[in-house]
Amino acid sequence: MPQKESTLTDGQAAYVLDRLVRERRISPSEVARYLADLPAEIRALEARLRSLRGEEVPSPSAVPRVQRTPQRVVRSQSSSRRATGNGKALGGMYGGLIRRIPAAEQQQYVDIKNTRGIEAAIAAMRSRKS
C-alpha cells in the first residue's frame, strides 16, 4: 500500500515537535543541531539549483557565512554541589570503606558522618590503623 504524504500546518508541526520532546523521543539538543544545520542545507540546495540552471557557482569562500552567537551555558548544579564533587561517588566510597570496618567500630564513623559530613568520615576511615 503506498504511503500517503502528510502535510502539516505550522501549528500541527509545532505540536508534534513539542510532543516528541516531551515524550523524550527527541532531545532539545537534537532540535538545536537540526536548526544549526539548516543554513548549510539551504546554501547547498541553492548551489545545486544554480548549477542545474547553468549559472556560475561561487566558491565557498565567496558565500556569506551566517555567524552564530555563542549560547550561554546554563549550570544546573548549585555552587555547593560543585565544590564537593559528585555525591554519589562519595556515598559509594563511604559504603565501600565502612564495610571493611568491623561492626563494633562502625558507629563512630557513622557519628562522624552525621556531625561533620561524609568527607570527614571518609578521611577518618582512611587514616584508621588496620
Image: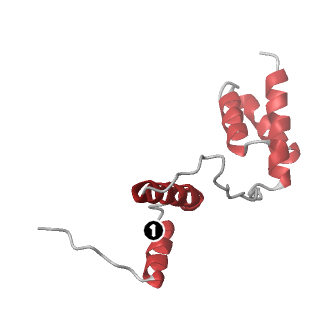
Up/down of 94 relative to 43, above or below: above
Q: Which part of the image, by quadrant, shows the C terminus? A: top right
In front here: 56 or 30?
56
At a point 47% along the width and 84% down the height, the residue shown is: 11
Give left or right: position of 56 versus 103. Answer: left
What is the crowding at mark 1: few (fewer than 14 residues within 10 Å), some, or many (at least 20)?
some
Placement of 11 over or under 108, stated as above or below = below
Q: Residue at x 66, y 46 (%)?
A: 61
Residue 38 placement, left or right of 98: left
Is residue 53 something that shows in the picture?
yes
| Residue labelled with disc 1 | 20
Q: Nearer the viewer, residue 128 or 11?
A: 11
Image quadrant assignment for residue 76: bottom right
Reply above or below: 41 against 85: below
Regarding residue 111, the answer to whether it shows in the image is no
| x then y, percent, for residue 68 | 71, 58
From this viewpoint, which residue is outermost toward the left? 1
Identify the element where label 1 is drawn. Answer: helix
Taking the view exactly as shown, the residue that stands out farthest to the top is 130
Which three-letter amino acid code belongs to the residue tagged 1?
Leu
The percent position of residue 21, horizontal first and vertical second, equals 50, 67
Image coordinates of residue 107 in percent, x first then y, are 76, 37
* Along the line of sight, the residue nearer the viewer: 118 or 102: 118
